[in-house]
């Protein structure tokens, strides 16, 4: 049953549209150069489908306090290159100069406004009731100049801020192409009745991964969980394996309340032990050298940097035979060549499976792009945190507002 509007539901030619994107990109803080434009490229189709509209783009870059918290000027330049048309950067959000620029737009024009997180309301109104966010000066000043609001920022959909949820309070709102595809493909994964669905959880976001593992198993969304990366280290600790101080020190730096996460993992093992796969061997970083080691030979003074060969063979077999699989977080420290084997081989197994395959998360996508196999997956999600929340069945504020707008304007 239809729950939200898309670009196809309206005649947008000649209209003024406000488009919220997520083009938050890795940036060299010294040169200001964008290091990876994957998220910008994802929005090209949405913008091209608005070629006969007046388009004003809202976006953020990083957050206050970080080295890459900077202007959206380089994004406009990169967007211009990708679209093969000028995208004008405007160094304001709703000041008089910005408003004059918006009022002078012609059909086909595209402008990108300044980083929305430069402005206090975007940050201080976070998580306030949506009615209040719709009544901010930001929204009240910009909204009257537009006919529609297009929400295309899936990667930020779990954020409740004025640029994400304020405009749907006062403008008809629809999903852009990125948002539409994310919701369609992830719902397909969650709702499919395949017998074998597995989740490969790795990387450093241990608390999120443990939460999603519990949800997947409790709700019978996934039949099995394969643990890798720091997630696997925590599950090994929960199983009573002494992994050694080298590994514990690294994980403790990245994971808040490590003992709490170990306890959560232990509870899951007690409840679903036969459905959670833990590495039987690992590869440690012995002063730069890859050394394979079965779990029985732990602890090691050296930190675990990858899954071992036996685990790799077992995991790859499960992935290749799965009806569907989702991967979030690389299995090892893939940035170092000697410890990229687990990531490369797990990714190859997922790319070659006949089942439905989904990957997500910034580091995950970066690894897949480095291998040149991004196009082999059924769906590559732009979201990291948003992907996890969505798969956990949590209501994402931006998506909630898209659906509310459909109910409101469908009756109009």
Image (cartoon, rainbow, N blue to C red):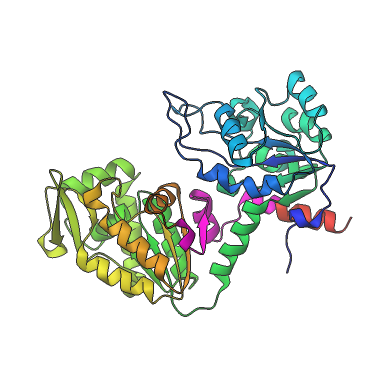
Does 8 sit left or right of 358 as displayed? right
Q: Residue at x 61, y 32 (%)?
A: 76
Q: Nearer the viewer, residue 114 or 172?
A: 114
| Residue 317 percent location from the top left of the image | 32, 74
| Residue 307 percent location from the top left of the image | 24, 59
Q: How many marks?
A: 0
Quadrant holding the C terminus = bottom right
Q: Is residue 158 visible?
A: no
Residue 215, relative to residue 253: is it above or below? below
User: Seen from this angle, which residue lies furthest right?
Assistant: 412
Does 359 sit left or right of 160 as displayed? left
Does 297 sit left or right of 368 as displayed? left
Quadrant holding the N terminus = bottom right
Q: Residue at x 62, y 31 (%)?
A: 116
Q: Quadrant of residue 253?
A: top left
Q: Is residue 13 visible?
A: yes
Q: Residue at x 40, y 66 (%)?
A: 350
Does 21 sit left or right of 56 as displayed? left
Residue 192 is inside the magenta segment: no
User: Seen from this angle, which residue lies furthest bottom?
Assistant: 195
| Residue 202 percent location from the top left of the image | 35, 56
| Residue 181 percent location from the top left of the image | 62, 58
Residue 278, relative to residue 150: is it above or below? below
User: Seen from this angle, which residue lies furthest top?
Assistant: 96
Residue 387 is inside the magenta segment: yes
Q: Nearer the viewer, residue 61 or 209?
A: 61
Q: Quadrant of residue 132?
A: top right
Query: Magenta span covers which residues?
Result: 374-401
């Amino acid at each position: 049953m239809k729950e939200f509007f898309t670009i196809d539901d309206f005649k947008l030619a000649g209209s003024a549209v406000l488009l919220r994107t997520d083009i938050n990109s890795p940036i060299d803080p010294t040169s200001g150069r964008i290091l990876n434009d994957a998220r910008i490229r994802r929005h090209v189709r949405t913008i091209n489908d608005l070629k006969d509209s007046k388009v004003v783009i809202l976006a953020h870059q990083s957050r206050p306090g970080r080295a890459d918290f900077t202007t959206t000027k380089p994004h406009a330049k990169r967007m211009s290159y990708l679209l093969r048309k000028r995208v004008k950067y405007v160094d304001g959000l709703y000041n008089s100069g910005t408003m004059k620029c918006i009022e002078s737009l012609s059909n086909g024009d595209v402008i990108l406004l300044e980083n929305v997180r430069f402005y206090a309301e975007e940050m201080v109104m976070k998580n306030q009731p949506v009615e209040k966010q719709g009544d901010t000066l930001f929204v009240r000043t910009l909204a009257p100049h537009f006919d529609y609001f297009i929400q295309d920022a899936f990667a930020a959909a779990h954020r409740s801020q004025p640029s994400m949820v304020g405009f749907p309070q006062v403008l008809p709102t629809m999903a852009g192409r990125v948002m539409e595809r994310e919701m369609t493909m992830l719902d397909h994964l969650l709702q499919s009745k395949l017998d074998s669905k597995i989740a490969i959880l790795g990387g450093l976001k241990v608390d999120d991964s443990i939460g999603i593992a519990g949800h997947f198993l409790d709700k019978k969304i996934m039949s099995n969980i394969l643990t890798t990366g720091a997630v696997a280290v925590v599950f090994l600790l929960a199983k009573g394996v002494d992994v050694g101080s080298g590994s514990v020190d690294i994980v403790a730096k990245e994971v808040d309340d490590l003992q709490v996460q170990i306890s959560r993992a232990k509870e899951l093992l007690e409840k679903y032990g036969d459905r959670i796969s833990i590495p039987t061997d690992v590869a440690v970083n012995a002063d730069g050298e890859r050394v394979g080691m079965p779990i029985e030979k732990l602890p090691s003074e050296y930190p675990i940097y990858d899954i071992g060969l036996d685990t790799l063979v077992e995991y790859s077999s499960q992935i290749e035979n799965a009806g569907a699989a989702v991967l979030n977080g690389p299995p090892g420290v893939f940035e170092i060549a000697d410890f990229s084997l687990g990531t490369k081989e797990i990714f190859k197994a997922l790319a070659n499976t006949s089942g439905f395959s989904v990957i997500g998360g910034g580091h995950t996508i970066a690894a897949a792009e480095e291998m040149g196999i991004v196009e082999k997956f059924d769906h590559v999600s732009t979201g990291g945190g948003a992907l996890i929340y969505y798969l956990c069945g949590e209501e994402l504020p931006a998506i909630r507002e898209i659906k509310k707008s459909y109910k409101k304007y469908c009756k109009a």
